[in-house]
Image: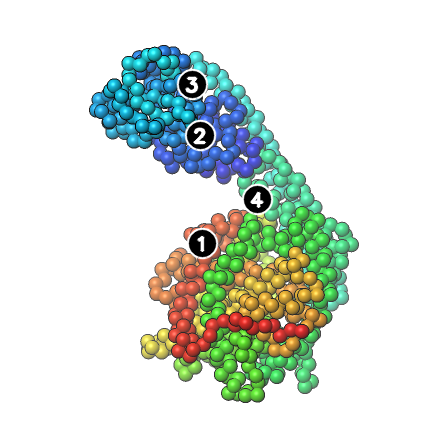
Amino acid sequence: MQQQHQDIFDIESPLNSKILLTRTVLRTCSRSSVVDENSSKDRVVDHLWLARTVLRTCSRSSVVDENSSKDRVVDHLWLARTVLRTCMTKQYFAIRKTWIDAQDYCESWGGGLATVSSPSENEYMMDLTDRTQPVWIGGTDGSIEGHWTWYNATNPENMITKFYWGGVQPNDYNNQDCLAYYKLSVGYSWADEDYKTVDINIKIVTDEISRVFIMESEAKLIGLKNALIELEYEFQRDENHVQRWFSSIDEEMRRLNNEYANAEWDFETNMSNKTETEHVQMSIKASRSMKEIAFKAREKQKLHYLRKDTRRRLRLLSQFSDPTDKNVLEQLTRTRSELENIYAVGTLQKDGKVYNMEPELTKLMQEERDPDVLNWAWKGWRNETGKKMKSLYAEMVKLLNLGAEENEYSDFGDAWRKSQFDDTPELLQMCETLWKEVSHLYKKLHAFVRMRLKDYYSKHFPSYKFPTDGTIPAHLLGNMWAQEWQGVYEIVKPFPDVSETDVTKEMSKQNYDVHKLFTMAEEILHVSWFGSNDKNLLEKVTTDFFTDEPDEQNDDFRIKMCTVVDSTYFETIHHEMGHIQYFMEYRNQPVVFRDGANQAFHEAIGDTISLSVNSNKHLKAVGLIPEDHTNNLEEEIKRDLNMLMKQALFKIAFLPYGYLIDLWRFRVFDGTIPEGDYNKEWWKLRLEYQGLSSPVVRTSEDFDPGAKFHIPSNSPYICYFVSFIVQFQFYESLCKASGHTGPLHTCDYYRSKGAGDKLRSFLQLGHSKPWREAMKVLTGTMDIKTDAITEYFSPLTEWLDKELQEKSQTVGWEGAKINFE
């Protein structure tokens, strides 16, 4: 009963509790079928209203106790039995009678001496007395001495199983066979008493009341029924008002989002003064509109009678953190654009060649091994980007905080966390716990990679001085930001002599092109799993830098992506198409719910798909690894370990970086890190969590965080950290749905309808449910756990343990210091 109403009303509102109270009183007191003698404790727990409604009487306004706990309701099982016929708690009469006469008297009223079945009832019975005279209750051991039952017991259920004796009671003094309450120095307790006793004032407690009172109660119920009608009218009025408002703004928000997406697309794909100005103007327009919607949503949150999902939708719409002043907002928007533009136009030049980040610098960091060349690229990129941004970034932080504080957030980081992970105040604690649970995986990988790199550079570049403090130089890991280390796979591969099919070469051999890669991803997502035959999907996915104007419907989906045909982009394309599929599945939700259940889940879905398509099983299924590759079991185990190492260089190596970026930003936003310490604190975190050292001395004049796109673009990042853990949980769930058996890392749920159905039921929810509820649909649990990622990499972890022990390698970098002045 209570659960049913929780789906309708927001019980957090006291006034809505009155609606629930009134309705349940009416149903309970007017229908004997609501509660019967066989009502279980579980059912009573579901009827939390019993404790509130009937604790004293059905007519008193003071019966609602907002602090009533479910445990207390369990103790009030007797209330259900009392409410069955009377809608009134126990009654007593101040008369003088023996125990037997008292029982007869109660029976003449259709009841009997009271029974006691729980601590709460015992306490309640004592409250009925005036604490000056004893009270008879209905227990006796008259039939068999010491065998206490409630009066006229005919079955074992009427045995008294719990006693509340006081002092030395029962003492059977003069063959005392009847139960009574006696006052002690503190409270009351049971005592046995002679059934013939008449020389004290006895109050008889009966389980039933007079017909007169029943008639009075029924009259009061009519008043309650009228109150219910009035309250439900109020509910419908408020609910209908908000639903009409939702209908009016949904179309407005859809058009606004479409216009903003167009302007952003034009700016991102063709950065010029014209597109930048249009982007700024559109950003200001969107912010003003969302500000108006947010403020109206906040006003409507004050209404009392709203459905729970309506209240959630209002809360999401009320999230707004932009500055309210027009000039300040315009300044913020332009500052953002300037920062993004600095990053976008950043280039290096060497020997007459121009190096953009994509693809030239990315390729250089992956393939070059000369530490001097890598140092040139690493330092040069930071000089061309981050160093030029520092003052602009500090200005953006100030403006972001100004807007957040105007909207009653403590700072922009506070606003950001609430928008990314709705209703998760413990987000940072949750992430720290997750990191602690997986940090051992990272530290073992770090120790092994450090060992292999040190050996490599000692052999091939003997003049290079590799650090001896346990750190790894940040420029040697095959990536400009050392966020993933797949670029050094050939150096750290566990079994370099084991032959492996080069997937990139195989693609070239089979004449793959970019369209072929996207077609494969489309077939997996849109056809194999979801059973759709929408052959026009790729017409809606643009991979070039320019495109025609999108239509205004819900089926315009785009990917901006520089793509080449290789195994890395094979994975990336499946990831990006995962985003597209998520968009498509929740496109029919109200606009405010057209998002992932949280930001991490949107990223995790694409990676969950990538985990499947990168398995050897899948690569064989699509013809990129020959089937005869598995003839030798020992060789296959080694290939699996090589594959797991390649995955770990991406999935495990990324974890601390994914975590520390927003740790740094949150401390910047809340003022813990002042502008003068931006770079110093950045490197402290990189050392603490990643165990990395900078290849050259860094200073406070540098701004190395800005060398990462997500800093100048002010894009969230902690969502990636969470996604890199939860994706394995998603993957494990889909593997189970597909019927997979064997090691987790060997699973491919390609063409599994069971996996597709489960995934689709999750994706279609969008942001309409709290993320924990959405997660339960896919995984069966509301908690993010590290069990799956640990299991996935367990074969590699066991192998690393042996290797590190055999080679006497120290795990960690304790005592290392940052290279800073």
Distance from disc 1 to disc 4, alpha carbons, whole Å, reads 21 Å
Measured from the top left, where is residue 763 in percent x and y? 50, 54
Instruction: Give the crowd class for mark 1: few <14, some 14-19, many >=20 residues within 10 Å.
Output: many
Residue wearing tag 3? 132
Residue at far left of view: 144
**Residue at image point 69% right, 85% down:** 352
Q: How is the image coloured?
A: rainbow
At mark 2, the secondary structure is helix
Distance from disc 4 to disc 3, alpha carbons, whole Å, reads 53 Å
Instruction: Give the crowd class for mark 3: few <14, some 14-19, many >=20 residues within 10 Å.
Output: few
Residue at far right of view: 327
Measured from the top left, where is residue 55 in percent x and y? 46, 27
Residue wearing tag 1? 778
Nearer to us: label 2 or label 3: 3
**Residue at image point 45% right, 30% down:** 51
Q: Looking at the image, do the residues carrying marks 2 and 4 touch, with CB atoms under 8 Å apart?
A: no
Residue wearing tag 2? 50
Distance from disc 1 to disc 3, alpha carbons, whole Å, reads 62 Å
Of marks 1 and 3, which one's residue comes earlier in the chain?
3
Of marks 1 and 2, which one's residue comes earlier in the chain?
2
Residue wearing tag 4? 312
